[in-house]
Image: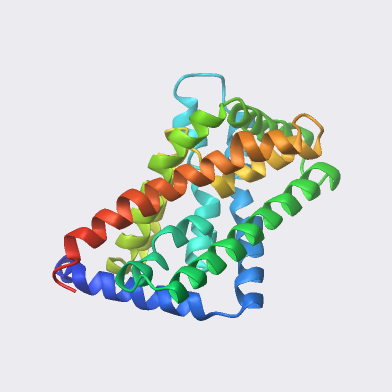
Amino acid sequence: MDAYEKVPSAVIFEAIRREGEHELSRPFSALWWSGVAAGLAISTSVLCKGFLESILPHADWAAGVSNLGYTVGFLIVILARMQLFTENTITPILPLFLAPSRANFYQTARLWSIVLAANLVGCAAAAVVLVHGHILPEARFDGILTVSRHYAEATALEHFAWGIPAGFIIAALVWILPRMEGAGEVLIIVILTYVIGLGGMSHVVAGSTELFLLVVRGELGPVEAVLGGILPAFAGNVLGGTGIFTALTYAQLREEI
């Protein structure tokens, strides 16, 4: 571990910048299908949290256990190197900060649009299958609905505010991962995403699965889901990930690059 702790921050910056340039140059189909897969996979966070919710008693400590399930989807998505929107609040932004040209702005906007749309399509597909496919026992599905209804209770302003620390944490996770390998990589993903779940923070992609479930069941209107949950969480995640973490990271290294 000591060897990784001694890696200079400027080296980490360069590694993430190069990864960002690679992502910006990837073709539409690669980004799209990776994003759809990520949307489907991140839905397992909602499933696993709901499973635990369905078997745990109604006690103050129960959230400390059920949110371990929230980490599952992030483990799948990040370790499988799928395209998750909130990871892209830092990866392609570093090349943009370094060279804020019109071409880089366009490429970043293109990447964000494709990945976010693909993530949401994956989440919507997962919601349709869960509601109409009857692929889960009713008791476990009821736990998922409980989790989803709780998420939908938040106001648009709350989703925005709660999305800021979630975006900051995911950006920090992306920054930390190049220093880790093996079990250390798994552990840091579990710890940081567990904190997001335990803190009741709003994550635009994972939260979309919860909202889409209620939309498909007719408990929530699509406009309300988008305007009251998805867009505010999106704005909060971008502010926390790009506007705060990534901007501060770049500021501290600007003179060294």
Q: Is residue 62 above or below residue 3?
A: above
Could you tell me residue 39's position as x and y percent?
Answer: 63, 56
Please state, as top left, top right, bottom left or bottom right, where the C terminus lies in the image: bottom left
Instruction: Indicate left or right for 142 with 151 as reference.
Output: right
Instruction: Indicate left or right for 3 with 159 as reference.
Output: left
Q: Which residue is found at the position 51% from the left and 80% from the top?
A: 25
- Examine the rendering and report whether any part of residue 127 can be seen: yes
| Residue 199, quarter of the rendered image | top left
State the residue lying farthest toward the top.
59
Q: Which residue is found at the position 71% from the left and 42% from the top?
A: 212
Residue nearer the viewer, 152 or 198 = 152
Residue nearer the viewer, 70 or 126 = 126
Q: Which residue is found at the position 53% from the left and 46% from the top?
A: 234
Could you tell me residue 232's position as x and y percent?
Answer: 54, 39
User: Total of numbered circles in the picture?
Assistant: 0
- Examine the rendering and report whether any part of residue 140 can be seen: no
Q: Is residue 125 above or below residue 9?
A: above
Could you tell me residue 51's position as x and y percent?
Answer: 63, 38
Please state, as top left, top right, bottom left or bottom right, where the N terminus lies in the image: bottom left
Q: Which residue is found at the position 72% from the left and 37% from the top?
A: 223
State the residue lying farthest toward the front.
102
Instruction: Indicate left or right for 241 with 28 as reference.
Output: left
Residue nearer the viewer, 63 or 195 = 195
Q: How is the rendered protein coloured?
A: rainbow
Could you tell me residue 7's position as x and y percent?
Answer: 18, 71
| Residue 213, quarter of the rendered image | top right
Residue nearer the viewer, 20 or 68 = 20
Instruction: Indicate left or right for 39 with 97 as reference.
Output: right
